[in-house]
Amino acid sequence: MPAPIHVPRWLSAPEPGWTRTADVIVVGSGIAGLTAALRLREQVDSVLLVTKTVLNEGSTAWAQGGIAAAMDPGDSPEEHLRDTLVAGVGICDVDAVTALVHEGPTRVRELVSLGAEFDRGPTGEILLTREGGHHRDRIAHAGGDATGKEISRALIAALDRVRTDPGIHVVEHAIVVDLLQDEEMRVCGVTLHVIGEGQVDGVGAAYARAVVLATGGLGQIYSATTNPSVATGDGMAIALRAGAVMADVEFVQFHPTVLWLGEDAGGQQPLISEAVRGEGAFLVDGDGVRFMRDIHELADLAPRDVVARAIVARMRETRTDHVFLDARHLGREFLERRFPTILASCRSHGIDPVTDLVPVAPAQHYASGGVRTDLDGRTSLEGLYACGECSCTGVHGANRLASNSLLEGLVFAHRIADDISGRFAAGELPASTPVHPSDDTVLVASKHRVDIQRTMTAGSGVVRTAASTAATAAALADLAATADGSEGGPKSWETTNLLHLGQLLTHLAALREETRGGHVRDDFTARDDVHWRGHTHVVRGADGALTTSFHPTPDQHLDQP
Ligand code: SIN
């Protein structure tokens, strides 16, 4: 039995040296944060948008494939709903998915009106492609394979148009350290560290009636990920420490086709978008065998978890650490036009998809769980909202459907902005006074980041067992015991966030004795709907102990592989 996990309330940090006040604080500047901030600005008096590095640095800008929405006349939200529920392996929240697929097309059209330029066909229609798990062409893309970059550009341009508006203030190079709460645990601000913005510098406190976390994922918890270096799970860890309910954190998505650069490659790895398979590329093993054909009716376009598991199985059978993607038949002209980013990235590593097989292997890509929210993005803590990858709206279940993440950020950011302004108008969410941080603090040295990544990859990665998760839990407990608070600053705050999330994720990975969604349990290889069709929730109590509960979902009567 692993030792109980103790999560202290605060990261060790200097006393705030400055303060700022706004109606709403939005943390993060991906599609979720920017959309929430822009919409809130139209509805409340003052918005403070803070981001860890610069506005376009997060995961959104790296999104290749596109944004899914039923915009083709032959498609329907109901079909998008069904594909999403099947990909989510029986544990999506149907109401959340219904909101996503019905509101999605309108939100994407609004994005177009705002200035986002999607790829279009000869008659001006938005081109739609297909990715894993979709039975229709419904993925809008931009710049071929640079969709996130274009969406980020359009949103930042919209923000630039209102930069002089006193109702919105943007602070870059600002890492949020912890949430501030009043005596009744209501969230009323954040502590944050800003590097040299001129007006403010060092650790400060920002107060607000509502805080929206839109901080993205936790990919840096593993050795290899498609996520950028800023994806250290800060928002999730901050919410965990403050006592928000966390949900489904064990469900990590491993993208099947990440460029394989050798066993020592670490950090952010180049993604080979599922859209390449959507346009006709296919997977082969080292002997040239197309192994996906025998595994799923959608073959290479099966849902992402099915493909990732099939690759892991094939790699084990053939005793290799990668398989190959064959796109050569698509031709130079098409590949260079449709996938310029991917071609440039492969070629920079000496691989030309026009003439070469592309070596690929699964790597961490997306956190399907996060801070539990309702349909308006409200968390279990009054005043705290979560949006995008750091949240768990229930849209993704055990495995996110391809290109639903940008859509989720867009749809739920609107819902959050409308909910907050509606509550302000009703006199709810009054300003309150934070309690002073206690001495229940912690800080792990940044040199341990690589130890966390190694043990998470070995024990709580795509393949898990009781023994592997126990070993990882023990290694993380040892690291937690080294915490002495001697090294301060952003790198050690990030490392401590990764440690807390690693402990939580590993705890849940050990509990879930089945194979569902992104991971393989080698000792429980089947899906177990009798015991495990449902959500895991975890909440930190006032004493720092974590309480876990299980919440079954009704049978969705879906044919799942
Ligand atoms: C991809 O382009 O394959 C990634 C898209 C996504 O993660 O939704």
Image (cartoon, helix red, strand yellow):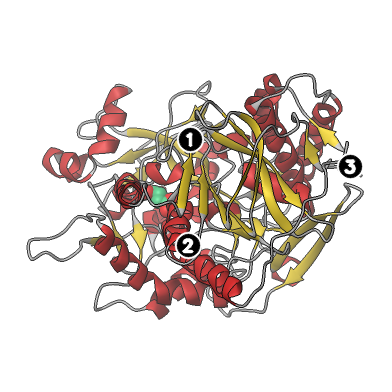
Residue 424 location (% of width, % of height): 59, 71
Residue 97 visible in image: yes
> Looking at the rendered structure, which numbered label has been put on residue 2?
3
Q: Amino acid at mark 1?
A: Pro
Above or below — where is 57 with respect to 449?
A: below
Q: Which residue is mark 1?
A: 228
Mark 1 or 2: the one toward you: 2
The residue closer to the viewer here, 301 or 451, is: 451
CA separation, marks 3 and 2? 44 Å
> Which of disc 2 and disc 3 is earlier in sequence?
3
Q: Which residue is mark 2?
A: 40
The residue closer to the viewer here, 454 or 77, is: 77
The residue closer to the viewer here, 288 or 373, is: 373
Q: Amino acid at mark 2?
A: Leu
Residue 559 location (% of width, % of height): 52, 74
Element type where label 1 sits in the image: loop
CA separation, marks 1 and 2? 27 Å
The answer to whether residue 269 is left or right of residue 8 is left
- In contact (CB < 8 Å): disc 1 and disc 2: no
The residue closer to the viewer here, 241 or 142, is: 241
